[in-house]
Amino acid sequence: MPKLPATLLGAALLLMIPGFGHASRWYQVEVIIFTQQDRYGTEAAPQDIDLQYPLRVTHFGEGDFSQLPKEQRQLNADAYTLARTGVYKVLFHEAWRQAGKSQEHTSWLLIKGGEQLGDHYQLEGSLKLYLNSYLHLVTNLWLLTPADAYSTPSTSTTTSTTTTTSVYASTRDLPPLPGEPSSGAQSLGTSTSSYPAVPLKEVYTFEQSDRLELGKIHYLDHPKMGILVKVTRAQRSDANTPVIANPTATSVLE
């Protein structure tokens, strides 16, 4: 049997490593997360939730995740349409580039947005886009609703005595944001945060896994939230390299 050249043998061995075969594929990912009204009032806040961040959570600028400037986003018109209706409130809108890797080789990306509630945010959690024959998006998000009488410190110092049956009665009970000082969630009553705890009325979770198509705007639905996501091919994570959008993709808001 003839021997394979060393270079071919090495390449064959590398392709056997999970996720390596997709390492050269880069994608531009854009995500809009917004609140929406529960028209039928049927979505009750779950009480037996356990909010946790995965072990590997990445911030923008770390690893393969390269955040893009606003002018390189492809869904700016959609975000504008959502905001102008007065019905939806955009909490998060970002675009970034990342390598297409297998699920086990892709880190979760930290998500936070919306109104600041003490040392937390109205929207928190993480999401993961990975490549396993097809593109998949997994969300691990939660939406915080402050108690009725609470207002942000910039407008009022009023707090509420409204209680909730959830184990997350205030922001002090939430898991701390990865990579940031602890909010005291791991040891109640010993918080070193400079922000007061914000009482919470409800906590809604958005845990979903969806298969995505390149160039298509996908809508992920939840009674309290919505997500628009679009993935296109891109060059390596150089934020100055323009990405050619799919000219045939149409907005789901049209």
Image (tube, rainbow, N blue to C red):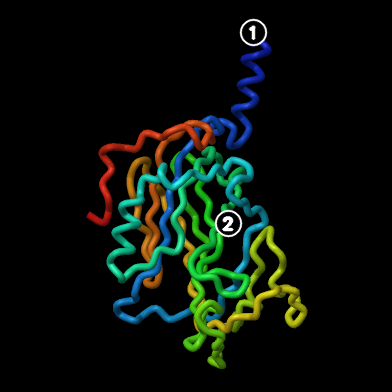
Could you tell me if the residues under marks 2 and 1 are in contact, i.e. CB atoms within 8 Å?
no
Residue 209: which numbered mark, if any? none
Give the residue number, with chain letter if any, for mark 2. Answer: 110
Q: Residue at x 66, y 67 (%)?
A: 176
Query: Which class describes the residues within 10 Å of circle 2: few (<14), some (14-19), or many (20+)?
Result: many
Give the residue number, with chain letter if any, for mark 1. Answer: 1
Q: Residue at x 60, y 45 (%)?
A: 61
The quarter of the image holding the C terminus is: bottom left
Q: Residue at x 39, y 69 (%)?
A: 35
| 182 sits left or right of 11 in the view | right
Residue 37 sits in which quadrant? bottom left
Amino acid bearing label 2: Leu
Residue farthest toward the left in the current orientation of the protein: 254
Residue 206, position as x, y percentages in the image? 47, 66
Amino acid bearing label 1: Met
Residue 140, position as x, y percentages in the image? 53, 62
Residue 200 sits in which quadrant? bottom right
229 over 183 or under it: above or below:
above
Residue 153, position as x, y percentages in the image? 56, 79
The quarter of the image holding the N terminus is: top right
Residue 156, position as x, y percentages in the image? 52, 84
Looking at the image, is mark 2 or mark 1 nearer the viewer?
A: 2
